[in-house]
Image (spheres, rainbow, N blue to C red):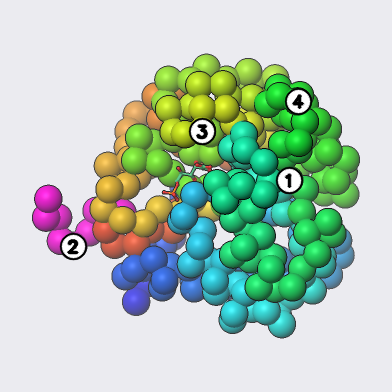
Amino acid sequence: MVSDVYDEDRRPLVHVAADADALGARLAAAFVDAAQRIIIERPFFVVLPGGNSPMPFFDRLASDYRHELPWDRVLFAWADERWVPASDRASNFAQARRGLFNPLGLDVRQVACPVPTELSAPGAAAEEYERRLRDVWAMSDGRPDWVLLGIGEDGHTASLFPGMRVDTGAWVVAVEDSPKPPPQRVTMTWTLLRRSRQLHIVATGQAKAVAVREARQAASDPVRFPLHGARRCEGEVHWWLDRAAAGEGDQRG
Ligand code: 6PG
């Protein structure tokens, strides 16, 4: 059972499902719907998060929608990457490869624009990643079609952490002291993320309920609450929550 909140004032749409699996199913359906409209004309440009939250979404795409899209017309990039080799289990790219690309039988060289973690340092990788994104997204006037972000219990999103001052002149920056391991990371900034045609934020579990509430309802303070950057998004903003993250139902503990 899913309840949707539609807002005619162009504020975020909120979709609440009973659990993470039901949410993943709805999110996958929304993804395929958006992709089908664009793919007729050009590639569909997607930005993925790291973490565990996208896993039910990946599962659904790889099972229910396997034959629904020309998958080689979807190009994936990452909102952030951990500074580990691409082969490391902790890599966000590796996680999408395991959860989505391999099950779909996709050639990663064709469908992925990963953060180049093989370079010497996060700063160099951030610059090079931005350059590659500008190249590949030239066909969509330099912006992504569909961005998915997670949220941490502390309110971080991508690798934009509370209290962090970010260079707003750059699309992508290096992070050297992430409070969530590993400390070195590469992340997109809101300068880029806010341009997305559609921005989707996913959260499941009661541990995220406070962060979600603050991100949605607190008075604007983008340094303290990184997801307040979404309030300046040029496109649609959607929240995808299970009942626990939405603060509904059993509030034990
Ligand atoms: C990362 C992330 C990060 C993640 C949140 C939520 O690489 O760590 O991109 O922003 O999305 O921490 O993580 P979970 O989905 O695992 O809770």
Identify the disc placed on residue 120: 4
Q: In this view, does 164 lie to the left or right of 105?
A: left
Q: Earlier along the polypeptide chain: callout 4 or callout 1?
A: 1
Residues drawn in magenta: 245-253
> Circle 2 — which element?
loop
Residue under pointer 2: 249
Mark 4 burial class by Cα count in 10 Å: few <14, some 14-19, many 20+: few
> Circle 4 — which element?
loop
Q: Which residue is drawn at 69% across and 68% down?
A: 102
Instruction: Determine the CA span between mark 1 and mark 2.
Output: 39 Å
> Circle 1 — which element?
loop
Q: Which percent across, then down, holds residue 107?
A: 80, 64
Q: Which percent across, then down, holds residue 41?
A: 86, 65
Instruction: Determine the CA span between mark 3 and mark 2.
Output: 34 Å
Which residue type carries mark 2?
Gly
Q: Earlier along the polypeptide chain: callout 4 or callout 3?
A: 4
Mark 1 burial class by Cα count in 10 Å: few <14, some 14-19, many 20+: many
